[in-house]
Image: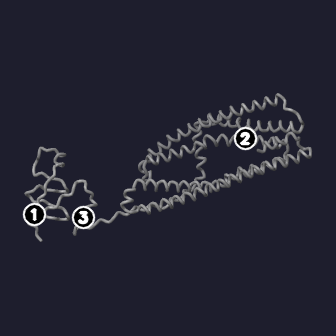
Amino acid sequence: MTTPENAPAVASGTATAPASAPAVASGKAAAPGPSPVGAAEKAAVPVSAPPGAPAAAPENADASASVPTSGQAAAPAPEATPTPETTPAPTPDTGALRSLLPVLGAHRVTVLRTCLAALVDQAALVALVTLAAHTVGTAVIEHRVPSAATVGVLVGLVLLRALATWREMDLSHDLAYRVLAELRVRVFDGLARSAPARIAGRRSGDLASTALGDVEALEFFYAHAIAQLLASGLVFAAAATLLGILGPWLLLAVVPVALLLLWSPLLEARGRAERGARTRAELADLSAESTEAVDGLRELLAAGALDRTRARLRSGGRRLARAQRAEQSWETGAGAARDLLVVAAVIGVVAAAAHAAGGGRLDGAWAPAAMALAL
């Protein structure tokens, strides 16, 4: 049916005013000519529509509330973007540990001082325990009280041990924090060169926070591993030499266990790296899924996808729990196995020392010292 010229025409649900009336478009009043009223005042002045014309929609009306007409199809509800499945755990790099050592080249003096302090610390501990065990053995077997010189040496070793422990902790942490400061600068420079082309769509702030958090995790390696491992190797070599002097048969209970303890980390290194990488990947997936769910909560509610998101979060939590249980179970079992090896070595030394002392091949006062050296 043809609409009269003096009546508003309705097309697609929008009211159009006649030429003699002010035009209404998208709820805004259009004046026929320039007006001294400011733009803000014009937007605030309501415009009356001609009789019989539908009211114009307000400016802040939601587009989803518009009523579709015969020529306009209803828009379908947006589908939730599917989240990719769990990211596969990366293959561990066997040279990752060696790649952490070159940064120490600029701190050779501090590294040397730290290793020396760690060596004095551990040597003082072994000497203190061995001398104390020998003193107790002498008092029990030979019924002799320790001399003043022995007591003085014991007191000196206690003081040396305390001072060396403090100095080693001071130097090792000074070295670690200097190295970490240098690594932070390198990481920041690398991100600055890579962004935005090579950050895989991630926010640079989140990526930098993750990378710097990984740098902080290296504090244990630089402060509690390098110098301590070197010092432990030297102290063990000295203790094994002393055991060999006391009785070569004592080494039969110590050296095989020491080789097993040295070989076990190398044997399980790849499996441990894979389990750790799997745990980190599951944790990263769950964190990303949780963050996206919180940020897009309104969209999820509008699309009715909140239940699916909850199901994905529960599934990710279960996968993370399984990965953590597997990693912790293996680490607990490996630690228990190492403790059993140490106990077996001590029992072997005790049995060998007792047999040697009973046969007259070892002084009875040195038997407790041999046990202390085995520890």
Task: Please identify the quadrant where the N terminus is shown.
Answer: bottom left
Q: For the residue carrying disc 3, how many other residues have a C-alpha within 10 Å: few (<14), some (14-19), or many (20+)?
A: few
Using residue 372 as the reference point, say whether residue 270 is left or right of it.
left
Q: How far apart are marks 1 and 3 (CA)?
A: 22 Å
Residue that label 3 marks: 67
Report the front residue among 333 and 270.
Answer: 333
Circle 3: residue type: Val
Could you tell me which residue is drawn at 79 percent across and 48 percent down?
346
Q: Position of residue 62 (x, y in %)?
A: 27, 57
Vertical position of residue 334 compared to residue 369: above or below:
below
**Percent x, y of residue 166:** 65, 33
* First-in-chain label (3 vs 2): 3
Q: What element carries label 3?
A: loop
Image position, residue 120 (x, y; %): 71, 35
Q: Mark 1 falls on what kind of element? A: loop
The disc at residue 7 is 1
| Residue 112 visible in the snapshot | no
**Which is nearer the N-term, disc 2 or disc 1?**
1
Task: Give the spatial CA distance, label 3 vs label 2.
Answer: 84 Å
Picture quadrant of residue 19: bottom left
Residue matched to label 2 = 234
- For the point 71% across and 38% down, the residue is 122
Q: Is mark 2 on a helix, strand or loop?
A: helix
**Contact, mark 2 vs mark 1 (Cβ under 8 Å):** no
Left or right relative to 168: residue 48: left
Disc 2 packing (10 Å; few <14; some 14–19; many ≥20): some
